[in-house]
Image: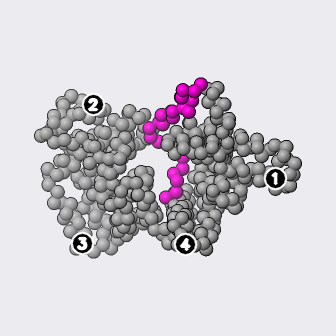
Amino acid sequence: MAKSRPSGRSKGPRRDAAKSILNSTQGPRAKRKAQSALSPTALLTQATDFLQTGQPDAALPLAQRALALLQQLSSTPMSMSAGPPTQKKSTARASLPALNLLGEIYIELGDSENAASHFLEAIEADPEGAVPQSEGGGAERFLWMAQLCEEGGEDSIAWFERGCQILERDIVELEARSPGRVEVKDLLEEKKRRLAAALCGMVEVWMTDLSLHPNAETTSTSLVARAINVSPTPSTLQTQASLLLSQSNILHARSILVQSLSLWQDLPEDHPDVPDFPSRISLSRLLMEARLEEQAMGVLEGLVAIEDGSVEGWYLGGWCALLMAGMGRNTKADREDTRREDGENEETADKEVESEEIRTEEERRVLMLTSREWLRNSLQLFELQEYEDDRLRDHALELVEELNRELQGVEDDAEGGDWEDEDEDGDGENDHEGQDLEMNGT
Protein backbone atom coordinates (compact mmCIF):
# COMPACT_ATOMS: atom_id res chain seq x y z
CA MET A 1 0.00 0.00 0.00
CA ALA A 2 1.04 3.58 -0.41
CA LYS A 3 2.20 5.58 2.54
CA SER A 4 -0.72 6.85 4.57
CA ARG A 5 -1.69 10.45 4.09
CA PRO A 6 -0.80 12.53 7.14
CA SER A 7 -3.40 14.94 8.44
CA GLY A 8 -1.67 17.06 11.01
CA ARG A 9 -1.20 14.98 14.10
CA SER A 10 -2.31 11.45 13.34
CA LYS A 11 -5.13 9.85 15.27
CA GLY A 12 -3.66 8.14 18.22
CA PRO A 13 -1.38 8.89 21.11
CA ARG A 14 0.32 12.24 21.00
CA ARG A 15 4.02 11.84 20.36
CA ASP A 16 6.21 12.69 23.32
CA ALA A 17 8.73 15.41 22.68
CA ALA A 18 11.89 13.82 21.31
CA LYS A 19 15.04 13.98 23.38
CA SER A 20 16.83 17.20 22.48
CA ILE A 21 20.29 17.01 20.94
CA LEU A 22 21.26 19.77 23.36
CA ASN A 23 20.86 17.46 26.37
CA SER A 24 24.52 16.62 26.68
CA THR A 25 27.52 17.52 28.79
CA GLN A 26 28.39 20.33 26.37
CA GLY A 27 26.84 23.75 26.73
CA PRO A 28 24.69 25.28 23.97
CA ARG A 29 27.53 27.45 22.65
CA ALA A 30 29.93 24.51 22.40
CA LYS A 31 27.27 22.41 20.70
CA ARG A 32 26.53 25.11 18.14
CA LYS A 33 30.22 25.54 17.44
CA ALA A 34 30.70 21.80 16.96
CA GLN A 35 27.59 21.60 14.77
CA SER A 36 28.70 24.45 12.54
CA ALA A 37 32.03 22.70 11.92
CA LEU A 38 30.27 19.66 10.44
CA SER A 39 29.87 19.29 6.69
CA PRO A 40 26.38 19.18 5.15
CA THR A 41 26.84 15.46 4.48
CA ALA A 42 27.72 14.78 8.12
CA LEU A 43 24.80 16.86 9.34
CA LEU A 44 22.39 14.99 7.06
CA THR A 45 23.76 11.66 8.24
CA GLN A 46 23.17 12.63 11.87
CA ALA A 47 19.71 13.96 11.07
CA THR A 48 18.81 10.75 9.27
CA ASP A 49 19.94 8.70 12.27
CA PHE A 50 17.74 10.78 14.57
CA LEU A 51 14.76 10.43 12.23
CA GLN A 52 15.16 6.66 11.94
CA THR A 53 15.30 6.32 15.72
CA GLY A 54 12.06 8.25 16.21
CA GLN A 55 13.55 11.64 17.12
CA PRO A 56 12.32 14.06 14.42
CA ASP A 57 12.60 17.04 16.77
CA ALA A 58 16.31 16.37 17.12
CA ALA A 59 16.72 15.76 13.39
CA LEU A 60 15.08 19.04 12.34
CA PRO A 61 17.79 21.59 13.31
CA LEU A 62 20.53 19.42 11.82
CA ALA A 63 18.73 19.11 8.48
CA GLN A 64 17.94 22.83 8.47
CA ARG A 65 21.60 23.64 9.10
CA ALA A 66 22.66 21.29 6.30
CA LEU A 67 20.26 22.99 3.88
CA ALA A 68 21.51 26.43 4.86
CA LEU A 69 25.14 25.36 4.32
CA LEU A 70 24.35 23.83 0.92
CA GLN A 71 22.60 27.00 -0.19
CA GLN A 72 25.42 29.14 1.18
CA LEU A 73 28.13 27.09 -0.55
CA SER A 74 26.29 27.17 -3.86
CA SER A 75 25.91 30.96 -3.78
CA THR A 76 29.58 31.85 -3.14
CA PRO A 77 31.34 34.30 -5.53
CA MET A 78 33.18 31.38 -7.15
CA SER A 79 29.89 29.73 -7.94
CA MET A 80 28.36 32.97 -9.15
CA SER A 81 31.22 33.53 -11.57
CA ALA A 82 30.35 30.39 -13.47
CA GLY A 83 27.24 32.08 -14.74
CA PRO A 84 25.65 29.56 -17.15
CA PRO A 85 21.83 29.47 -17.33
CA THR A 86 21.76 26.03 -15.76
CA GLN A 87 23.56 27.22 -12.63
CA LYS A 88 20.41 27.99 -10.65
CA LYS A 89 19.02 24.50 -11.26
CA SER A 90 22.38 22.91 -10.41
CA THR A 91 22.48 24.92 -7.20
CA ALA A 92 19.01 23.73 -6.26
CA ARG A 93 19.88 20.14 -7.15
CA ALA A 94 22.73 20.21 -4.65
CA SER A 95 20.11 20.85 -1.96
CA LEU A 96 17.92 17.88 -2.93
CA PRO A 97 19.05 15.52 -0.12
CA ALA A 98 18.37 18.17 2.53
CA LEU A 99 15.01 19.17 1.02
CA ASN A 100 13.79 15.58 0.86
CA LEU A 101 14.95 14.82 4.37
CA LEU A 102 13.28 17.94 5.74
CA GLY A 103 10.05 16.89 4.02
CA GLU A 104 10.15 13.53 5.76
CA ILE A 105 11.02 15.11 9.11
CA TYR A 106 8.03 17.43 8.88
CA ILE A 107 5.86 14.42 8.00
CA GLU A 108 6.91 12.80 11.28
CA LEU A 109 6.24 16.05 13.13
CA GLY A 110 2.72 16.19 11.71
CA ASP A 111 3.42 19.39 9.74
CA SER A 112 2.00 18.52 6.33
CA GLU A 113 2.19 22.08 5.03
CA ASN A 114 5.93 22.42 5.58
CA ALA A 115 6.50 18.91 4.31
CA ALA A 116 4.72 19.65 1.04
CA SER A 117 6.62 22.93 0.68
CA HIS A 118 9.99 21.18 0.85
CA PHE A 119 8.95 18.34 -1.46
CA LEU A 120 7.64 20.85 -4.02
CA GLU A 121 10.94 22.76 -3.89
CA ALA A 122 12.78 19.50 -4.52
CA ILE A 123 10.47 18.65 -7.43
CA GLU A 124 11.02 22.08 -8.97
CA ALA A 125 14.76 21.44 -8.92
CA ASP A 126 14.38 18.01 -10.57
CA PRO A 127 10.94 17.85 -12.24
CA GLU A 128 11.68 14.74 -14.33
CA GLY A 129 13.35 12.74 -11.56
CA ALA A 130 16.55 12.62 -13.61
CA VAL A 131 18.84 12.96 -10.59
CA PRO A 132 19.83 9.56 -9.13
CA GLN A 133 18.15 8.61 -5.89
CA SER A 134 21.56 8.46 -4.20
CA GLU A 135 21.88 12.21 -4.86
CA GLY A 136 18.41 13.15 -3.67
CA GLY A 137 16.42 12.31 -6.80
CA GLY A 138 14.00 9.47 -7.38
CA ALA A 139 10.25 9.01 -7.13
CA GLU A 140 9.61 9.44 -3.39
CA ARG A 141 8.91 13.19 -3.54
CA PHE A 142 6.15 12.64 -6.10
CA LEU A 143 4.61 9.77 -4.13
CA TRP A 144 4.61 11.88 -0.98
CA MET A 145 2.87 14.72 -2.81
CA ALA A 146 0.20 12.25 -3.94
CA GLN A 147 -0.56 11.77 -0.25
CA LEU A 148 -0.15 15.40 0.81
CA CYS A 149 -1.98 17.36 -1.88
CA GLU A 150 -5.10 18.87 -0.36
CA GLU A 151 -7.20 18.49 -3.50
CA GLY A 152 -6.86 14.70 -3.59
CA GLY A 153 -8.72 12.89 -6.35
CA GLU A 154 -7.33 13.51 -9.82
CA ASP A 155 -4.47 15.64 -8.45
CA SER A 156 -3.33 12.72 -6.29
CA ILE A 157 -3.54 10.41 -9.29
CA ALA A 158 -1.39 12.82 -11.33
CA TRP A 159 1.33 12.82 -8.66
CA PHE A 160 1.19 9.04 -8.40
CA GLU A 161 1.54 8.70 -12.17
CA ARG A 162 4.64 10.90 -12.22
CA GLY A 163 6.19 8.80 -9.47
CA CYS A 164 5.27 5.58 -11.27
CA GLN A 165 6.89 6.78 -14.50
CA ILE A 166 10.17 7.36 -12.67
CA LEU A 167 10.01 3.95 -10.99
CA GLU A 168 9.22 2.20 -14.28
CA ARG A 169 12.19 3.94 -15.92
CA ASP A 170 14.46 2.91 -13.05
CA ILE A 171 13.25 -0.71 -13.32
CA VAL A 172 14.01 -0.83 -17.06
CA GLU A 173 17.50 0.55 -16.45
CA LEU A 174 18.19 -1.96 -13.66
CA GLU A 175 16.93 -4.87 -15.75
CA ALA A 176 19.42 -3.84 -18.47
CA ARG A 177 22.30 -4.23 -16.01
CA SER A 178 23.62 -7.52 -14.64
CA PRO A 179 20.47 -8.83 -12.89
CA GLY A 180 22.49 -11.65 -11.36
CA ARG A 181 24.44 -9.27 -9.12
CA VAL A 182 23.03 -9.32 -5.61
CA GLU A 183 23.02 -5.55 -5.14
CA VAL A 184 21.25 -5.01 -8.48
CA LYS A 185 18.72 -7.75 -7.73
CA ASP A 186 17.90 -6.31 -4.31
CA LEU A 187 17.52 -2.78 -5.67
CA LEU A 188 15.33 -4.06 -8.52
CA GLU A 189 13.04 -5.88 -6.08
CA GLU A 190 12.75 -2.75 -3.94
CA LYS A 191 11.84 -0.61 -6.97
CA LYS A 192 9.18 -3.13 -7.97
CA ARG A 193 7.74 -3.12 -4.47
CA ARG A 194 7.56 0.66 -4.49
CA LEU A 195 5.89 0.65 -7.92
CA ALA A 196 3.31 -1.92 -6.78
CA ALA A 197 2.66 0.14 -3.63
CA ALA A 198 2.16 3.29 -5.72
CA LEU A 199 -0.28 1.51 -8.03
CA CYS A 200 -2.19 0.29 -4.98
CA GLY A 201 -2.20 3.86 -3.68
CA MET A 202 -3.90 4.91 -6.90
CA VAL A 203 -6.50 2.17 -6.40
CA GLU A 204 -7.29 3.58 -2.96
CA VAL A 205 -7.87 7.02 -4.48
CA TRP A 206 -10.16 5.57 -7.16
CA MET A 207 -12.10 3.63 -4.51
CA THR A 208 -12.58 6.70 -2.29
CA ASP A 209 -12.18 10.18 -3.79
CA LEU A 210 -13.11 9.07 -7.31
CA SER A 211 -15.55 6.28 -6.45
CA LEU A 212 -18.40 8.00 -8.30
CA HIS A 213 -16.43 8.24 -11.54
CA PRO A 214 -17.96 5.96 -14.21
CA ASN A 215 -14.57 4.30 -14.83
CA ALA A 216 -13.65 3.87 -11.16
CA GLU A 217 -14.21 0.12 -10.99
CA THR A 218 -12.58 -0.82 -14.30
CA THR A 219 -9.61 1.46 -13.64
CA SER A 220 -9.13 0.03 -10.14
CA THR A 221 -9.26 -3.53 -11.47
CA SER A 222 -6.67 -2.70 -14.12
CA LEU A 223 -4.34 -1.04 -11.62
CA VAL A 224 -4.56 -4.00 -9.22
CA ALA A 225 -3.69 -6.38 -12.06
CA ARG A 226 -0.66 -4.24 -12.92
CA ALA A 227 0.46 -4.16 -9.29
CA ILE A 228 0.20 -7.92 -8.89
CA ASN A 229 2.10 -8.45 -12.15
CA VAL A 230 4.90 -6.17 -10.92
CA SER A 231 5.17 -7.49 -7.36
CA PRO A 232 2.59 -9.84 -5.79
CA THR A 233 3.36 -8.80 -2.22
CA PRO A 234 1.02 -9.34 0.75
CA SER A 235 0.02 -5.67 0.61
CA THR A 236 -0.74 -5.88 -3.11
CA LEU A 237 -2.98 -8.89 -2.54
CA GLN A 238 -4.60 -7.03 0.36
CA THR A 239 -5.57 -4.22 -2.02
CA GLN A 240 -7.03 -6.75 -4.43
CA ALA A 241 -9.10 -8.27 -1.61
CA SER A 242 -10.31 -4.83 -0.57
CA LEU A 243 -11.47 -4.15 -4.14
CA LEU A 244 -13.23 -7.53 -4.29
CA LEU A 245 -15.03 -6.85 -1.01
CA SER A 246 -16.22 -3.49 -2.37
CA GLN A 247 -17.66 -5.45 -5.29
CA SER A 248 -19.38 -7.90 -2.86
CA ASN A 249 -17.23 -10.74 -4.21
CA ILE A 250 -16.65 -12.13 -0.73
CA LEU A 251 -15.66 -15.69 -1.65
CA HIS A 252 -12.89 -14.56 -4.00
CA ALA A 253 -11.77 -11.94 -1.47
CA ARG A 254 -11.42 -14.65 1.17
CA SER A 255 -9.15 -16.77 -1.01
CA ILE A 256 -6.94 -13.75 -1.77
CA LEU A 257 -6.71 -12.81 1.91
CA VAL A 258 -5.73 -16.36 2.86
CA GLN A 259 -3.10 -16.28 0.10
CA SER A 260 -1.79 -12.95 1.41
CA LEU A 261 -1.52 -14.35 4.94
CA SER A 262 0.33 -17.45 3.74
CA LEU A 263 3.15 -15.30 2.34
CA TRP A 264 4.28 -13.98 5.71
CA GLN A 265 2.48 -15.39 8.76
CA ASP A 266 5.20 -17.97 9.49
CA LEU A 267 8.10 -15.55 8.94
CA PRO A 268 10.05 -13.85 11.76
CA GLU A 269 8.87 -10.38 12.73
CA ASP A 270 11.92 -8.63 11.24
CA HIS A 271 11.61 -10.29 7.82
CA PRO A 272 11.17 -7.72 5.00
CA ASP A 273 8.11 -9.55 3.65
CA VAL A 274 6.20 -9.10 6.92
CA PRO A 275 3.76 -6.17 6.48
CA ASP A 276 4.17 -3.19 8.76
CA PHE A 277 1.89 -2.53 11.72
CA PRO A 278 -0.64 -0.25 9.93
CA SER A 279 -0.94 -2.73 7.04
CA ARG A 280 -1.74 -5.55 9.45
CA ILE A 281 -4.33 -3.41 11.21
CA SER A 282 -5.96 -2.89 7.80
CA LEU A 283 -5.65 -6.61 7.08
CA SER A 284 -7.47 -7.52 10.29
CA ARG A 285 -10.34 -5.23 9.30
CA LEU A 286 -10.53 -6.88 5.86
CA LEU A 287 -10.50 -10.34 7.40
CA MET A 288 -13.35 -9.38 9.71
CA GLU A 289 -15.29 -7.93 6.79
CA ALA A 290 -14.73 -11.18 4.87
CA ARG A 291 -15.99 -13.11 7.92
CA LEU A 292 -12.62 -14.74 8.58
CA GLU A 293 -12.69 -13.88 12.26
CA GLU A 294 -10.36 -16.68 13.40
CA GLN A 295 -7.61 -15.45 11.07
CA ALA A 296 -8.27 -11.83 12.02
CA MET A 297 -7.92 -12.67 15.71
CA GLY A 298 -4.60 -14.39 15.02
CA VAL A 299 -3.28 -11.26 13.31
CA LEU A 300 -4.48 -9.03 16.15
CA GLU A 301 -2.98 -11.24 18.85
CA GLY A 302 0.35 -10.93 17.07
CA LEU A 303 0.00 -7.15 16.88
CA VAL A 304 -0.71 -6.56 20.56
CA ALA A 305 2.13 -8.94 21.41
CA ILE A 306 4.61 -6.58 19.73
CA GLU A 307 2.79 -3.33 20.61
CA ASP A 308 0.55 -3.64 23.65
CA GLY A 309 -0.17 0.09 23.64
CA SER A 310 -2.21 0.02 20.44
CA VAL A 311 -5.69 1.37 21.10
CA GLU A 312 -6.92 0.17 17.71
CA GLY A 313 -5.37 -3.27 18.09
CA TRP A 314 -7.19 -3.97 21.38
CA TYR A 315 -10.42 -2.43 20.04
CA LEU A 316 -10.43 -4.57 16.90
CA GLY A 317 -9.58 -7.69 18.90
CA GLY A 318 -12.52 -7.04 21.21
CA TRP A 319 -14.84 -6.49 18.30
CA CYS A 320 -13.52 -9.61 16.54
CA ALA A 321 -14.03 -11.81 19.62
CA LEU A 322 -17.59 -10.49 19.88
CA LEU A 323 -18.25 -11.52 16.27
CA MET A 324 -16.73 -14.94 16.96
CA ALA A 325 -19.23 -15.30 19.82
CA GLY A 326 -22.03 -14.87 17.30
CA MET A 327 -22.92 -11.33 18.31
CA GLY A 328 -22.96 -8.19 16.23
CA ARG A 329 -24.62 -9.72 13.21
CA ASN A 330 -26.95 -12.53 12.17
CA THR A 331 -24.22 -14.98 11.29
CA LYS A 332 -26.30 -17.62 9.54
CA ALA A 333 -28.25 -15.05 7.56
CA ASP A 334 -25.02 -13.36 6.56
CA ARG A 335 -23.59 -16.64 5.33
CA GLU A 336 -26.70 -17.24 3.25
CA ASP A 337 -26.30 -13.77 1.74
CA THR A 338 -22.70 -14.64 0.91
CA ARG A 339 -23.77 -17.82 -0.87
CA ARG A 340 -26.19 -15.83 -2.99
CA GLU A 341 -23.54 -13.20 -3.78
CA ASP A 342 -20.72 -15.60 -4.61
CA GLY A 343 -22.54 -18.65 -5.91
CA GLU A 344 -20.80 -20.64 -3.17
CA ASN A 345 -21.20 -24.40 -3.20
CA GLU A 346 -24.24 -25.10 -1.03
CA GLU A 347 -22.76 -28.16 0.68
CA THR A 348 -19.57 -26.29 1.63
CA ALA A 349 -21.59 -23.34 2.87
CA ASP A 350 -23.83 -25.54 5.02
CA LYS A 351 -20.78 -27.13 6.66
CA GLU A 352 -19.43 -23.66 7.38
CA VAL A 353 -22.66 -22.61 9.09
CA GLU A 354 -22.80 -25.87 11.03
CA SER A 355 -19.24 -25.31 12.31
CA GLU A 356 -20.33 -21.97 13.74
CA GLU A 357 -23.29 -23.53 15.51
CA ILE A 358 -21.09 -26.16 17.19
CA ARG A 359 -19.74 -23.49 19.55
CA THR A 360 -20.96 -24.28 23.04
CA GLU A 361 -22.48 -21.80 25.44
CA GLU A 362 -19.32 -21.99 27.54
CA GLU A 363 -17.18 -21.17 24.49
CA ARG A 364 -19.45 -18.25 23.67
CA ARG A 365 -19.24 -17.03 27.28
CA VAL A 366 -15.44 -17.13 27.23
CA LEU A 367 -15.36 -15.27 23.91
CA MET A 368 -17.70 -12.59 25.27
CA LEU A 369 -15.59 -12.16 28.38
CA THR A 370 -12.47 -12.00 26.22
CA SER A 371 -14.14 -9.43 23.99
CA ARG A 372 -15.06 -7.23 26.94
CA GLU A 373 -11.54 -7.48 28.38
CA TRP A 374 -9.95 -6.39 25.08
CA LEU A 375 -12.42 -3.54 24.68
CA ARG A 376 -11.76 -2.36 28.23
CA ASN A 377 -8.02 -2.43 27.57
CA SER A 378 -8.65 -0.29 24.51
CA LEU A 379 -10.77 2.21 26.45
CA GLN A 380 -8.21 2.45 29.22
CA LEU A 381 -5.43 3.16 26.72
CA PHE A 382 -7.72 5.65 24.97
CA GLU A 383 -7.89 7.73 28.13
CA LEU A 384 -4.21 7.35 29.04
CA GLN A 385 -3.02 8.39 25.57
CA GLU A 386 -5.68 11.05 24.99
CA TYR A 387 -6.51 9.23 21.77
CA GLU A 388 -8.35 11.37 19.24
CA ASP A 389 -10.75 8.95 17.51
CA ASP A 390 -14.04 9.56 19.32
CA ARG A 391 -15.94 7.24 16.98
CA LEU A 392 -13.74 4.33 18.02
CA ARG A 393 -14.36 5.12 21.71
CA ASP A 394 -18.10 5.42 21.22
CA HIS A 395 -18.29 2.11 19.38
CA ALA A 396 -16.15 0.37 22.02
CA LEU A 397 -18.45 1.67 24.77
CA GLU A 398 -21.49 0.55 22.80
CA LEU A 399 -20.04 -2.95 22.43
CA VAL A 400 -19.20 -3.16 26.14
CA GLU A 401 -22.77 -2.18 27.00
CA GLU A 402 -24.07 -4.88 24.66
CA LEU A 403 -21.78 -7.44 26.30
CA ASN A 404 -22.86 -6.38 29.79
CA ARG A 405 -26.49 -7.00 28.86
CA GLU A 406 -25.65 -10.39 27.37
CA LEU A 407 -23.52 -11.40 30.34
CA GLN A 408 -25.99 -10.45 33.09
CA GLY A 409 -25.59 -12.85 35.98
CA VAL A 410 -22.20 -14.09 34.74
CA GLU A 411 -19.36 -13.66 37.18
CA ASP A 412 -16.53 -11.60 35.75
CA ASP A 413 -13.23 -10.09 36.75
CA ALA A 414 -13.69 -6.43 37.75
CA GLU A 415 -10.05 -5.41 37.24
CA GLY A 416 -10.92 -3.31 34.21
CA GLY A 417 -12.03 -0.41 36.41
CA ASP A 418 -15.25 1.58 36.46
CA TRP A 419 -16.66 2.55 33.09
CA GLU A 420 -19.49 4.79 32.07
CA ASP A 421 -21.42 1.75 30.89
CA GLU A 422 -21.38 -0.06 34.25
CA ASP A 423 -24.77 -0.82 35.81
CA GLU A 424 -26.01 2.12 37.84
CA ASP A 425 -27.11 -0.13 40.68
CA GLY A 426 -23.42 -0.64 41.52
CA ASP A 427 -23.53 -4.44 41.36
CA GLY A 428 -19.89 -5.52 41.14
CA GLU A 429 -18.60 -8.32 38.98
CA ASN A 430 -16.55 -11.02 40.66
CA ASP A 431 -13.72 -13.11 39.32
CA HIS A 432 -15.11 -15.62 36.85
CA GLU A 433 -14.06 -18.95 38.32
CA GLY A 434 -10.40 -18.05 38.40
CA GLN A 435 -10.11 -17.64 34.64
CA ASP A 436 -7.48 -15.08 33.66
CA LEU A 437 -8.68 -13.15 30.66
CA GLU A 438 -6.39 -10.18 31.06
CA MET A 439 -4.98 -10.02 27.53
CA ASN A 440 -1.28 -9.74 26.94
CA GLY A 441 -1.36 -10.32 23.24
CA THR A 442 -1.58 -14.11 23.54
Residue 414 in sight from this viewpoint:
yes
Q: Which residue is mark 4?
A: 179
Instruction: Name the residue that disc number 3 marks.
Output: 348
Callout 1: SS: helix
Q: Which mark is residue 304?
A: none
User: Helix, strand, or loop for circle 4?
Assistant: loop
* Whole-number angstrom distance, CA of label 2 to CA of label 3: 45 Å
What kind of residue is marked 4? Pro
Q: Nearer the viewer, mark 4 or mark 1?
A: 4
Q: Quadrant of residue 85?
A: bottom right
Q: Earlier in the sequence, mark 2 or mark 1?
A: 1
Assess disc 2: are there few (<14), some (14-19) or many (≥20) residues with their C-alpha within 10 Å of its C-alpha. few
Tally of numbered tags: 4
Spatial separation of the CA atoms under disc 4 and disc 1? 36 Å
The span from disc 3 to disc 1 (Cα, nearest Å) is: 70 Å
Where residue 278 appears, x then y in whole percent?
Answer: 43, 51
Residue at disc 3, secondary structure: helix
Asked if labels 4 and 3 touch by Cβ distance under 8 angstroms, the answer is no
Label located before the other in sequence (2 or 3): 3
Q: Which residue is painted at 62% across and 36% down in the image?
A: 61
- Residues in magenta, as a range: 1-27
The residue pinned by badge 1 equals 87
> The residue under label 2 is which amino acid type?
Asp
> Residue 171, relative to residue 131: is it above or below?
below
Residue at x 51%, y 33% (from the top left corner): 19
